[in-house]
Image (cartoon, grey):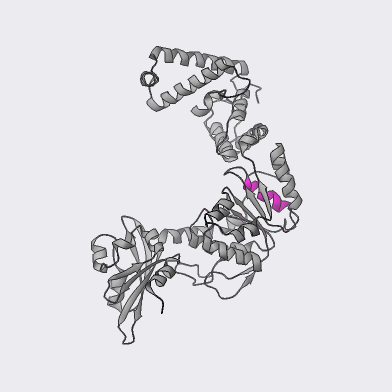
Amino acid sequence: MMSGDNLQRVIDAMSDGVYITDGNGITVTVNKAYERITGIPRSALVGLHMSEVVQRGYISRSVSLEVLKEKGPVTLTQTIGEDHKILVSGTPMFDSRGRIEYIVTTVRDVTELLQAKRAEEQLEQILHVRDHYGAREAREALIISRATQQCYDLAKRVAPTAAKILIQGETGTGKTLLARTIHEYSAVAQGPFIELNCAAMPESLLEAELFGYVPGAFTGAAQKGKTGLLEAANNGTLFLDEIGDLPLSLQAKLLKVIAENRFIPVGGTQFKKTNFRLISATHHNLHELVAQRKFREDLLYRLSVVPLELPPLRERAEEVEALLNHYLHHFNCKYEFDCRWQREVIERLRRYQWPGNIRELINLTERLVVTAEQSLITTAQLPRELRVDSAIGRVGVSLKEQVEALEQQLIEQALELYGTTRQAAAALDIDQSTLVKKQQRWRAQQQAKDAGNGTTRESTDV
């Protein structure tokens, strides 16, 4: 017979919430998933009668009390706190004399069910997602830095093989773009390209998305069941983004799929065969996750037959101008504008560190286009942190220029923090008149630069 500790370990391994009471309605235990879903710790519930749990406001009504009244299974919706709704199903367990010995309640977050429904509706969009970066030739025209070119050259060499590829790089460096390029050069290029972000949904939904489910697999499941992405990717490419965030339980199941090329849908009993090209990506250091026992070492070596490293945009400064022009054209077409870059803007953005990489560049370009008051986008329109020239620490820039750049940066930050020139000057321990004069001088210098480059729609700047 299973001991209490072992029973607790078993129910803690379940992704659905579990709440167990005895035949009198007194709480015996709950699992970790219940604590996560409801936010109520086990220590606050164990030993409480269900009527006390309701009285204390933990839940709106008790399914266990309804089971005791009905002497049979009951399903209802509970409200946790003010507006958090969960779906609960209580099932009685009878002893040999027909008396209720325990009531086992399973709990599922209604929010997750709604997400599952939306995921179902969006599956077609996942299968036919648009290529945001445009045609292959246009995309590859942007790959001009030596580091990125070496990465793409290796990717295209191994693309025709069945070798599994792991793409590593910071968030926003273009890992999805690289995965699509590999697919287009592969032997399964005519098949589907299926993408799943492993960090975008909870474990229970991830399993349903990957493996699919049979009709009636769980409460709220679609009547016809659901095709999983493992099956949808057959004779194509499956791209698992943010693989480092895949839960350990699913890592074991994915490893089995990779080894056997078959899987069992959620709630099913029959194997389904599948054959796809697997590409994974992550911004994590998977070797560190293996050392922390958060990622399976055997899965790492299965995924990383060919590792590819995408450098961050700050190490690809020669690509910045091409990317800026590409996305400026994209958003001009999208919004029917005719914006152009002032040369000083491009030079300043080439020197920017881009912590958000290409994704940040895309967002900034769109913001500047839609907020532009004139055709020419000038440095005056840049966000505050980009309006100050990044001359600080650059080789070849005089000490005087670097000191002035630092001075301007500190004053801009103080103005943003305190709101007025008087308070900013006081915080910096300088006269208000000194601060205002510096501002006027910098503004005049910028206006002179803008005038030299032209600021009207007739300007021939970039």
- Check if residue 183 falls in the magenta segment: yes
Q: Nearer the viewer, residue 425 or 444?
A: 425
Instruction: Kindly indicate the quadrant of the structure image that contains residue 411.
Output: top left
Is residue 303 highlighted in magenta?
no
Work out whether 320 lies above or below 246: above
Classify the position of the N terminus by image quarter.
bottom left
Picture residue at 52% right of the left edge, 31% below the top: 371
Q: How many marks?
A: 0
Q: Is residue 294 above or below residue 383?
A: below
The x, y position of residue 430, in whole percent, is 40, 15
Farthest front residue? 291
Picture quadrant where residue 12 is located: bottom left
Is residue 382 in view?
no
Relative to the observer, which residue lies in front, 351 or 4? 4
> Residue 305: image x %, image y %?
68, 56
Is residue 22 found left or right of 291 in the rendered image?
left
| Magenta stretch, residue numbers | 173-199
Q: Residue furthest bottom?
A: 97
- Above or below, comparing residue 54 to residue 365 in the picture: below
Q: Is residue 438 left or right of residue 330?
A: left
Q: Residue at x 53, y 20 (%)?
A: 405
Percent x, y of residue 36: 39, 59
Q: Does residue 201 appear in this view? A: yes
> Which quadrant, please, contains the C terminus?
top right
Q: Position of residue 162 (x, y in %)?
A: 72, 59
